[in-house]
Image (tube, grey):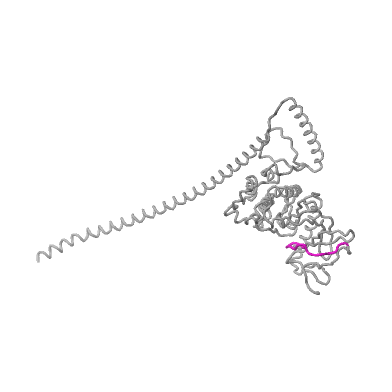
Amino acid sequence: MAGDISNLPAGSKLQGGKYRIIKILGQGGFGITYLAEQTGLGMKVAIKEFFLKGSCQRDSATSEVSIPVTDNKELVAKCQKKFKSEARKIASLNNDHIVNIIDIFDENGTSYYVMKYLSGGSLADKVQAGPLPEKKALKIIDEVSDALESIHTHGLLHLDIKPANILFDERDRAVLIDFGVSKYVDSQDDTTTTSSLVGFSRGFAPLEQVNATISSLTPATDLYALGATLYNLVVGTTPPEASQVMDSGLPEMPSGISEEVKYAVTKSMQPRKKDRPQNVRSFLEMLPSETIQQQEDEVTVVAAAPDPTIVQAPAPRSAKVWQFASAFLLCATLTFGALLFFQKKDEGPDLSGEVKTLTSEKVDLQKQVDGLQSKEKSLTQTNSTLRKQVDDLKGQVSSQNNRINTLQNENAKLTRQVNEYKPKAERWDRSMNSK
């Protein structure tokens, strides 16, 4: 073997010259991403190569990838199979905010998939300059949420949502990338990640992911990362690690951030999964409604006050067009009827203020509920502490009682001895006096 390297050098060609490597864009534990040129069209693309760090090595002369340790071959083969399987799954999602995979192939003893190159930089780059305006941050989170909802609907978890994995296309739209640690939600075993082991990014991963308990991961795991990403955008710093959140909670956020955003972030980053939003829709409902664009599959006609515990599932994509058309016709009819009505009435009720007030009251009530739950937990802990103190005091009292009984027994013994020697002392005294 002529020598070992980890990456393909610049100028390397794939698929008989169809793709030419320009440079490395990034390298992680599960693979290497290159900037490349599709030579036929003269178009830049990004190519992800499966290369399991620590298990794979490359011959510098042939670029062939091998697995030098025999015991690792089964694991690498399984991970490579999932790498290709889930690449095909992602390619089928057809979402503007999910990276577009356009080709997949095997070469050099490993696998590759080709993606559209996103030239707008990463969200991490934008945050380096400081926190984003809340409205801009919410627009980005809305677009990432659209991607995440599509992923969850198709039975996948992303498991690595963070600003570095959110890029921007030529239209400045946020696009979610890097599914290197994604997994199927409905898996039956603990070996179902795309590239074997579950990785995590500090500050953006909850405890269940940090502890690498694969079977415990749910959509709420991704919702934690989404809330942490929103925290990063509006605060401008990396969120504290999950263990710190568990011990001390989140630091107080700047006063310029709206209460709704603070509440959404706090709820999403709860240490216990059951205390977080359980799906993307319930997360979005906590954000300021005037800043979130309505998604196509969220068109709903409200006939009565909805039950806040019921969250509608997203409509199938095949029904979107008909739903949108029906909703448009209904809205047009209602608008026309409203115009006729107000032509006959000088002024009508403006409900927008009431809606805003009710929304604010809903947030306040939820905060009160959370506060009461926290107090209940605190009182339970206090009661347990007091009960332990009472038990300790009872133990001390019992110990003192035993000590008193012992002393009383010793005193009685001494009294008996005194009584026994008293007659002898009296006789001795009389004897001495007679002399």
The image quarter in which residue 86 lies? bottom right
The image quarter in which residue 1 lies? bottom right
Would you say residue 398 sits in the magenta stretch? no
- In the orientation shown, which residue stands out farthest toward the front? 346
Visible in this render: residue 102? yes
List x then y, in percent, for residue 417.
Answer: 24, 60
* 432 left or right of 413 in image: left
Q: Is residue 105 above or below residue 226?
A: below
User: Which quarter of the image is occupied by the C terminus?
Assistant: bottom left
- In the orientation shown, which residue stands out farthest toward the top? 344
For the magenta stretch, what is the residue range?
A: 18-32
The image quarter in which residue 238 lies? bottom right
- In the orientation shown, which residue stands out farthest toward the right? 40
Visible in this render: residue 192? no
Q: Nearer the viewer, residue 380 or 333?
A: 333
List x then y, in percent, for residue 434.
Answer: 9, 64
List x then y, in percent, for residue 433.
Answer: 11, 64
Would you say residue 28 sits in the magenta stretch? yes
